[in-house]
Amino acid sequence: MLPKYYEFLNSVKIMSGENALENLPHELKMMGAKKPIVLTDAILAKCGTLDKVQKAFKGFDIDVTETYTEIPPDSSIKVINEIAGIFKAKGCDSIIALGGGSVIDTAKGLRIVIEQGGNDIMDYMGLDSLPRKDRIAFAVIPTTSGTGSECTNVAVIANPDKNVKMEFISYDLLPDFAVLDPRMTETMPPKITANTGVDALVHAIEGYTCLQKNPLSQSYAFAAIRLITTFLPKAVLEGGNHEYRLAMSNAATMAGIAFSNSMVGLVHAIGHAIGGVAHVPHGIAMAILLPHVMKFNLETLKPAYAELLLPLAGAEIYATTPKEERAQKAIEFVTAFIKQFESVGLPTKLSDAKVTEDQFDAIAQTAINDGAIVVNPIMATKEQVIEILKEAF
Ligand SMILES: [Fe+2]
């Protein structure tokens, strides 16, 4: 059934494949970029990934020597404002983000400050009211396959003074280019490959089933799920295989496009709260919660989960499972799929992720105030969230 009204946008040019990186200089040149600032983190600067990016620009009239390599795991307003100062002082004209979600979200915040001509990201809360200004070129090179941030209209930026994470949502946050090159993800360790990949799976499942779903976002979600269940276990086992890595990069991007145009749901609402209260990394919280939230949503989402058995488990299992059992089978499949990654250190219980029962009240209270909870097909109460936490313990 079509929604009465919906909107869908993905304006990002996606460049996917072996040596995709080498096509980026030409694209940036076409946008008039001469001196991008390259944002990354200390590990990527040290392990040679940054070198590969800089080498790709050899022979082009683009100066990529201005780098900021100290972006922390939680991007913050302080870091963004500091980089904005450097950007202006050094005469930069465009942005390249090389990294995972934190680096990409920092770059999104930086672009807003620079384009709006200000000095402080906090001046631009409530982004949809921002006037359109001249765009500066913005390319993203993801080094994980999970957040989908290269194609989403969302940035999560920490405000350390108030100890909160602020969510910015605006179509202005979409980059111009996303480069999916397997050389950029091949060194990701198995545990991070697993938990970021499961995050992408949650984006796809919640994007397919939440109240703001629409046929376009559902088609991206459906295709992403098939890629994830086929290739994530292989990418975890054999990280150097470029076919597997590229498949997962594509899956994460497609799942990102899906949820950027629908929303996520209760897994994310509780997951954000667990991150805030108990500091559990996002992908790990997703892996622990997904099966339990699917059980909670089962009665309402039975037809949708039954449909998802096809991309989750493949045509043979779908065809041989009686219609009325497919939704339950989809949950069983997801539970076993996640459990296989315990072998690379992925926790599948809250107790294994060092969450304690005395934190449940604070987690549940935070979760019911999270924006993602309102598009979950069942409006969960605080008591119901606590029940889910108990099950996941
Ligand atoms: Fe997520």
Image (spheres, grey):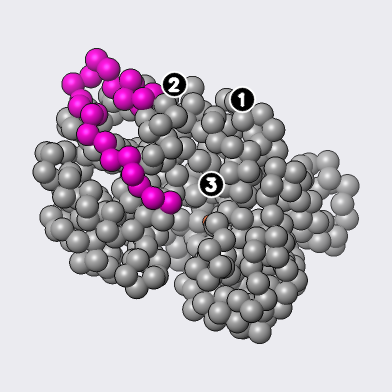
Q: In the image, is the residue at mark 3 within 8 Å of ligand 1 by its beta carbon?
A: yes
Look at label 2 and name its amino acid: Asn
Q: Which residue sits at x=67%, y=76%?
A: 357
What crowding class fits label 3: few (fewer than 14 Cα within 10 Å), some (14-19), or many (20 or more)?
many
Is 15 rendered above or below residue 226? above
- Quarter of the figure that contains the N terminus: bottom right
- Quarter of the figure that contains the C terminus: bottom right
Instruction: Give the secondary structure at mark 2.
Output: loop
Q: For residue 241, which numbered disc appears in the image?
A: 1
Q: Is residue 146 left or right of residue 41?
A: right
Tell me where the magenta segment starts and ends, as one range.
51-73
Q: Earlier in the sequence, mark 3 or mark 2?
A: 2
Q: Position of residue 218 (x, y in %)?
A: 57, 53
Q: Earlier in the sequence, mark 1 or mark 2?
A: 2
Q: Is residue 208 visible?
A: no
Q: Is residue 341 left or right of residue 208?
A: right
Instruction: Give the secondary structure at mark 1.
Output: loop
Is 135 rendered above or below residue 269? above
